[in-house]
Image: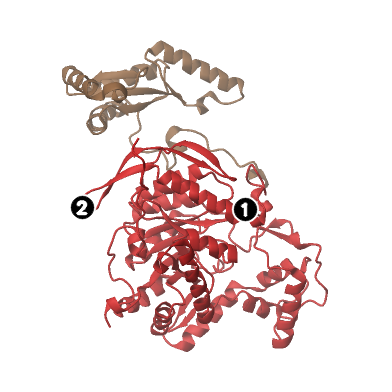
């Protein structure tokens, strides 16, 4: 489930509620992954990131700017790793849907600077655990209702 | 002989769908589901510079005597995602997909085919088929809602609506011939089948409109094709019959203000080659026997007999019992053979006159002709059919998935290229380029 929240405590409240509802519905709460939307503007330092954000807002015009209401990180790749870990450790998110403000620039910074930190800290995979998206998200594969009869 | 004087042959490959053309019992037979099977045939055909890859569709698993008919293909993936995936692993070959016009909305189909055309950079084709079969319709919200007589009316209106949507975007043609989609205009289509208005969300695609194939053979189907289609996927593999069909359909084009070259007639055919004529004939006979084992022959007969015939020997004479004409729903999801009394009478007459066993009768009835011989002979025949207007080319149907056409592509196509009847290289990038079809422009619009 994708959620939008700008405050960690708000995200945690949403995630707790989703897990409660899943439990009440007879589901394993871990079978529902709550992913927080996160807009990124990643730079070498905080100032260069802020400068790019200013430029994007200048260019963006009425609809072309960054999404409103979503958590936004403006800073370095390592700071981004710290933010992700902080929200994750606090139970505010099972993961994140990253929305790079500049696809190429941000993606490079995240892959080159953020992911290695998360891997070193042991909170992100080094290799894919399996082949399917369910494997990657750690979700069980639904059984066929006829499986027992085979 | 030079290329200019020869009519150019158009060739496609057919990825096997339902029916008993494919010999699934052959150990070389691969998956009809794995992407690698689709990829092999598409890339192999592209290496040979073929016009297009063709994908059939089945919307309900066939049933026979109340059970899934598992002598045939059971299950396959959806047409459009397969073609979209193929667009990523091929560069030039056209990608033709069969999608039923009875159960879908013009907005979604227009979007999907325009998207495929964008992803493939101008290689999309839509094979329009119709169905009024309630058994297939059960899978859909409206069920078997459409009268048989209305199936082409709906198809024609669906195409008209789809074209309205494709034409609702402006485009600019650059000096170097590229087209760039520009703004969208509101669209509106009102008719007995569809009543839709809004704005279309998919930009004008490289071909303007995807190429339209049509496969119906009835008079209504021919008329619909003459009015609407770019390609007819026909079933007239015999020479004289092919010429008659060709003339009939091409003669209908003038009524719609269309050029005789604006509609290509491309029947399906099988090809069996061998180093000698005898070797090829023997291989063809073996394939036919494998396509129609005894159990398949009995099941085929049961469709008309309407009763269980498993006690009969497929190598023996036709059953002495009369068909049960009240039980014609024994097979579901298959095209009907016509009036069962008349069909049964004809079959008995044929079998008696020729002293055919059940299996031999079914072998003869399900024979689709096809080219059999040395590579040179097959190339001669394909070329003769096209040069003498029995067709504009062929869709090659393999008996094995996915390697069944490898030998034809490797050994027959080069001979056609040598004699200048088939391209040695792609001249253009889009399927319209390959087929020699004009790209539709956007209609003139009043300036708002």
Q: The brown chain is which one?
A: A
Image quadrant where residue B367 sits: bottom right
Taking the view exactly as shown, the residue that stands out farthest to the right is: B321
Name the subunit of mark 1: B
Helix, strand or loop under label 2: loop
Q: Is residue A137 above or below residue B353?
A: above
In x, y percent, where is residue B400?
Answer: 49, 68
- Callouts 2 and 1 in the same chain: yes
Mark sitting earlier along the chain (2/1): 1
Mark 1 closeness class: few <14, some 14–19, many ≥20 residues within 10 Å: some
- Residue in front for this viewpoint, A147 or B123: B123
* Residue occupied by mark 1: B60
Placement of the C terminus of chain B among the 4 image quadrants: top left
> Residue at point 36% right, 54% down?
B440
Relative to B23, B200 lies left or right: left
Name the subunit of mark 2: B
Chain B painted colour: red
Relative to A26, B41 lies left or right: left
In x, y percent, where is residue B77?
Answer: 51, 51
Q: Is residue B281 above or below residue B304?
A: below
- Residue in front for this viewpoint, B244 or A87: B244
Q: Is residue B114 above or below residue B439?
A: above
Task: Residue B33: tell me if it is visible.
Answer: yes
> Residue at point 32% right, 51% down?
B121
> Residue at point 51% right, 84% down?
B281
Q: How far apart are marks 2 and 1 (CA)?
A: 47 Å
- Specify how the rendered protein is coloured: by chain
Relative to A105, B18 lies left or right: right
* Residue occupied by mark 2: B176
Mark 2 closeness class: few <14, some 14–19, many ≥20 residues within 10 Å: few
> Residue at point 55% right, 66% down?
B24
């Amino acid at each position: 489930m994708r959620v939008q929240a700008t405050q960690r405590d708000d995200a945690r409240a949403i995630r707790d509620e989703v897990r409660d509802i899943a439990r009440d519905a007879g589901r394993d709460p871990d079978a529902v992954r709550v992913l927080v939307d996160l807009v990124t503007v990643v730079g070498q330092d905080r100032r260069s990131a802020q400068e790019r954000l200013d430029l994007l807002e200048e260019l963006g015009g009425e609809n072309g700017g960054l999404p409103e209401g979503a958590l936004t990180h403006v800073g370095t790749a390592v700071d981004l790793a710290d933010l992700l870990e902080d929200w994750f450790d606090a139970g505010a998110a099972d993961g994140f849907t990253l929305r790079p403000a500049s696809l190429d620039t941000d993606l490079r910074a995240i892959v080159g600077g953020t992911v290695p930190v998360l891997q070193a800290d042991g909170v992100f995979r080094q290799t894919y655990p399996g082949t399917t998206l369910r494997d990657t998200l750690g979700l069980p594969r639904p059984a066929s209702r006829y499986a027992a009869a085979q | 002989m030079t290329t200019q004087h020869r009519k150019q042959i158009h060739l496609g490959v057919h990825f096997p769908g339902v029916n008993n053309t494919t010999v699934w019992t052959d150990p070389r037979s691969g998956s009809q589901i794995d992407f690698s099977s689709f990829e092999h045939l598409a890339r192999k055909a592209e290496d040979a510079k073929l016009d297009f890859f063709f994908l059939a569709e089945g919307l309900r698993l066939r049933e026979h005597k109340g059970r899934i008919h598992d002598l045939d293909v059971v299950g396959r993936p959806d047409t459009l995602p397969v073609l979209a995936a193929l667009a990523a692993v091929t560069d030039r070959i056209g990608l033709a997909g069969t999608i039923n016009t009875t159960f879908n909305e013009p907005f979604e189909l227009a979007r999907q085919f325009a998207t495929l055309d964008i992803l493939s950079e101008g290689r999309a084709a839509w094979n329009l088929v119709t169905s009024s079969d309630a058994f297939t319709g059960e899978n859909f919200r409206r069920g078997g809602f459409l009268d048989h007589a209305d199936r082409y009316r709906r198809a024609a209106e669906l195409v008209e609506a789809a074209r309205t949507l494709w034409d609702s975007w402006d485009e600019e043609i650059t000096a170097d011939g590229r087209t760039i989609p520009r703004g969208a205009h509101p669209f509106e289509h009102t008719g007995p089948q569809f009543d839709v208005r809004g704005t279309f969300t998919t930009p004008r695609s490289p071909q303007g409109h995807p190429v339209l194939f049509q496969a119906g053979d009835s008079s209504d189907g021919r008329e619909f094709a003459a009015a609407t289609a770019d390609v007819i996927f026909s079933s007239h593999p015999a020479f004289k019959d092919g010429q008659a069909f060709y003339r009939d359909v091409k003669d209908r084009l003038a009524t719609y203000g269309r050029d005789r070259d604006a509609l290509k007639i491309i029947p399906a055919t099988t090809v069996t080659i061998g180093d000698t004529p005898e070797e090829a004939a023997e291989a063809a006979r073996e394939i036919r026997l494998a396509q129609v084992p005894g159990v398949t022959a009995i099941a085929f007969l049961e469709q008309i007999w309407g009763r269980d015939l498993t006690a009969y020997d497929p190598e023996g004479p036709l059953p002495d019992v009369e068909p049960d004409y009240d039980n014609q729903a024994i097979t579901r999801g298959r095209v009907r053979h016509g009036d069962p009394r008349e069909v049964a009478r004809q079959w008995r007459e044929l079998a008696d006159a020729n002293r055919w066993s059940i299996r031999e009768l079914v072998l003869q009835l399900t024979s689709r002709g096809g080219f059999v011989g040395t590579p040179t002979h097959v190339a001669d025949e394909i070329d003769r059919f096209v040069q003498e207007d029995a067709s504009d080319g062929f869709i090659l149907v393999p008996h094995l998935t996915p390697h069944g056409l490898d030998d034809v592509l490797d050994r027959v196509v080069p001979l056609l290229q040598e004699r200048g009847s088939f391209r040695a290289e792609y001249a253009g990038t889009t399927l319209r380029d390959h087929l020699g079809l004009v790209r539709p422009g956007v209609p003139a619009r009043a300036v708002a």
